[in-house]
Image (spheres, rainbow, N blue to C red):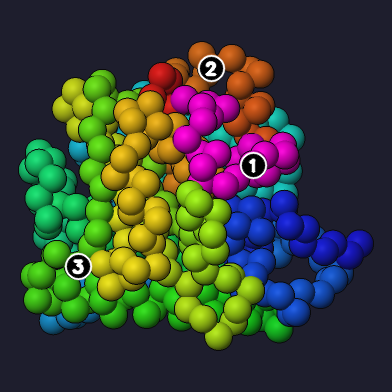
Amino acid sequence: MSKKVGRNDPCPCGSGKKYKNCCLGRNQGSQRSHDQSLFSLINQGKKKSNFKECLFPDHTHCSDTIINAHTIPKGKVLSRIAEDGFVYMPVFGEHMLESSLLKKIGLNSATVFTGFCGYHDKTLFQPIEDVPFSGTTEQVFLHIYRAFAFEYHKKRHAFEMQRLLGTANLFGIGFDLATKDFADEKKLFDKALLANDYAVLTSFIWEFPGAANFAATGQEVPTAGFDQLPIQNILDESAPMRHLYFSVFPEGELTIAIFAWLSKFDTLFTDISVRLSSLSADERKNFVNNTIIRSTENIAIRPSSWEKLDPVRQHAFQSMFVDLAPTDDTYASRLLPAVVDFFSL
């Protein structure tokens, strides 16, 4: 039975995001109907196409083993959120909403990717793993770099998956473009790492009272600002897309949210920068909640916190998460209360 990828279907790149919010614009003109189940293809390809490579630009000191590196620190954050060694995370598959989108995942498997060797995963991220967060330029950079590395690796994985499955002619053009977009930004991250020059980001660091029972990282390509004027045209294959990255995590008795982009692209994000600078505390919280729902599947939630959530809100969240419920997704709308307040979990 043929299945065409719909705008609101999960993106075939395996990111977990809605197709229209991920690779749709990069795949215009290349999508075709095909005779195998989309999700079966994804499940077949994920294991075959997963590659192991240390993303640190200098491999001089790389250890022999590429590890399952955590995008959200295991010891400092995930262990704090977990219960009995498990957290809830979104899991996408062929029957993703048959029972529940969120499933219990063991700590050794939660938020992992094979993007760093053991040496660099340990030494590079020590300032955010072993030291309290104080908002230093280096700490902010490392949180955002880790979010970037995961997203870059994920896109490369998706492109390789399509190649191995023989579907690159259907979706590969879009994934190739998206990978190149991240590769452009990787050059800037790499240069900063090698020079120990971490002041390459424009960032917003928000502190919220109370330690959250969740943590998340992610990215998105802003196409319009709060004023709804266009920023980037995702349908323009000749123009590289620039990303906004974020990381949200409990720290002590606070919750920290970091939003950032490479400063080289400040002009592009002028309206967003101005508005993020002026948000009230409630608007900041709403923006975090809505952005997580719209932009990432890389979120871990304390099991008891998710389980005690009203089933109606669980369903509403899951429907919003995969865009099964209609919504206004302008940046301005993200300042309104979200269907789920993660901070109250």
- Report the front residue among 332 and 173: 332
Q: Position of residue 22 (x, y in %)?
A: 58, 61
| Kind of residue indicated by mark 3 | Val
User: Is residue 71 placed above or below 177 in the rendered structure?
Assistant: above
How far apart marks 3 and 1 lie (CA) works out to 32 Å
Res 166 quadrant in image: bottom right
**Residue 309 marker:** 2
Residue at screen point 60% across, 24% down: 314
Mark 3 = which residue? 200
Is 51 a magenta residue? no
Tell me the residue at 14%/64% (across/down). 199
In this view, the residue in front, 30 or 231, is: 231
Report if the CB atoms under discs 2 and 3 are less than 8 Å apart: no
**Region in magenta:** 320-341
Left or right, 164 with reference to 202: right
Image quadrant containing the N terminus: bottom right
Mark nearer the viewer, 2 or 3: 3
| Horizontal side of residue 17 vs 70, given as left or right | right
**Viewer-nearest of discs 3 and 1:** 1
Name the element at disc 3: loop
Q: Main secondary structure of the magenta part?
A: loop
Residue 68 in picture, x, y percent from top left: 34, 57
Amino acid on which disc 2 is placed: Leu
Q: Tag on residue 328?
A: 1
Left/right placement of residue 192 relative to residue 13 reads left
- Vertical side of 42 occupied by 160: above or below: below
- 325 in the magenta segment: yes
Query: Regarding mark 1 in the picture, which secondary structure is present there?
Result: loop
